[in-house]
Amino acid sequence: METMGNKLLITKILKNGRCFIAAALFQNRKLLEISLEMVGEESILGNIYVGRVKNVVKNLNAAFIEIARGKPCYYNMEELKEPLYTKKINSPRMVQGDEVVVQVVQESSKSKPPKVSTNLNLTGKYLVITSENHTLGISRKLGTETRERLREAFAFDPGEGFGVIVRTNAATASTEEIQEEYQQLRQEYVSLKERAPHRTAFTCLKAGVPEYLHALQGVNQEQLEDIVTDDAGLFQQVEGYLAKFQPEDLGKLSFYEDPLLSLGSLYSLERRIQEALQEKVWMKSGGYLVIQPTEALTVIDVNSGKSIAKKQAEEHYLKINLEAAEEIAHQIRLRNISGIIIVDFIDMKSVPFQEMLMQSLRSAVRSDSVPVQVMGMTKLNLVEITRKKIKKTLAEQAKHFH
């Protein structure tokens, strides 16, 4: 019998004359997350550049900063704290022509340009160093005792000129492992600050890791049991990354070899991707979801479908809604839906049932690797959810996949 441990598959899929690198996270045979990156169109997420301020839009309190000629990115000036300028026009404010170090924190989406931040993040397995927030933060996913233990064990000096976030993975790490990574990240940050003033505009000071390594970096390492690939080049890349940053996880990496059946075929990846792009999702109860993205938000409608109402209609609707809550949490993670999500559950008059549903939904979204907030239920019994936007939705990643 298979354990509940997670497995990360990294493989290449050839589709319509294009090559995609897929990183798929499974729990047993259930697909939790998948990302697709087309070879030749690699993501710039996480890249750090010397950018040049193209223009400042005062009424938006924003600036557009170019990271390459003709490639402007949106920058929210409300977060302006301690930008690392490499060239400053004589003005206390950020102005056109300034050159500043920025990091891409959100990919371009539809008609919107990428977003950049002056709060630089250097991410390790256990820690993240942040340039503008000079405090010690600890992942909220950890329990109170663990958080207190880590706070006491971690020697951090706020006078260093940067902050530290302790990630969920640190829960099972030794103090020595955490301190060792801290010194590595600290050295990387100091080096970056020293190099930046000597570089010209549009220089990439640090490239973010490829999407498939980003998936490896973002996963809960304690739950990850296997990392499998069937591509020699990808195996080499992952092995090199693990050897440098996560040597204790090298034993999880294996090479799949079968001339008759590819890794993608073994796990039916193409079919699963196509299913994750469909509007309708059937549930075991016979009910179904309809997932419709719009320009401003995503709407999810819960329907009783084939499910035949019994005498106790309210109890019956509660059962479908509870199943729907689990499936919605799964689908928004799988499809990487972000921003505002409005869910129209089947109406229930019972307040205790409504509360049970909200509790179930909040519990279901906790396992998501991206921050999700269940805001509450409106007077029209619509449930509002927000999910942090970082990278493109699966539909956007798969636009050349059909």
Image (cartoon, rainbow, N blue to C red):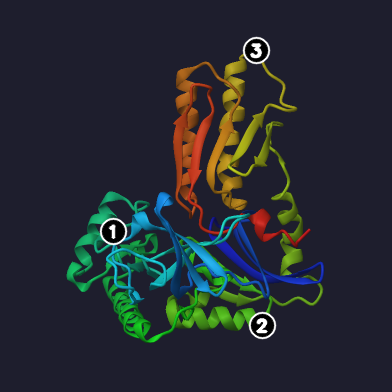
Q: CA distance from mark 1 to mark 3?
A: 51 Å
Identify residue type, mark 3: Lys
Within-10-Å neighbours for mark 3: few <14, some 14–19, many 20+: few
How far apart are labels 2 and 3 at the CA level? 59 Å
Depth order, front residue of 124/257: 124
The image position of residue 115, as x and y in percent, is 49, 61
Residue 93 in sight in this render: yes
Q: Position of residue 180 (x, y in %)?
A: 30, 78
User: Which residue is rendered at x = 34% and y = 51% of the image?
Assistant: 140
Answer left or right for 354 relative to 276: left
Out of 350 and 374, give the one closest to the viewer: 374
Instruction: Give SS at disc 3.
Output: loop
Q: Residues within 10 Å of mark 2 (few under 14, many from 20)?
A: few
* Image quarter in which the N terminus is found: bottom right
Q: Amino acid at mark 1?
A: Gly
Q: Residue at x 59, y 84 (%)?
A: 236
**Marks 1 and 3: which is nearer the front?**
1
Quadrant of the image occupied by residue 322: top right
The secondary element bearing badge 1 is classed as strand
What residue occupies the far front of the structure in this picture?
Answer: 90
What residue is shown at x 35% (from left), y 68% (from top)? 127
- The residue at which mark 2 appears reads as 232
**Image height check: is 100 above or below 327?**
below
Residue 197 badge: none
Q: Which residue is mark 3?
A: 311
Q: Counting residues from the N terminus, which is met first, the one under dot 1 or under dot 3?
A: 1
Residue type (three-letter) at the residue carrying disc 2: Ala
Which residue is identified by label 1?
A: 137
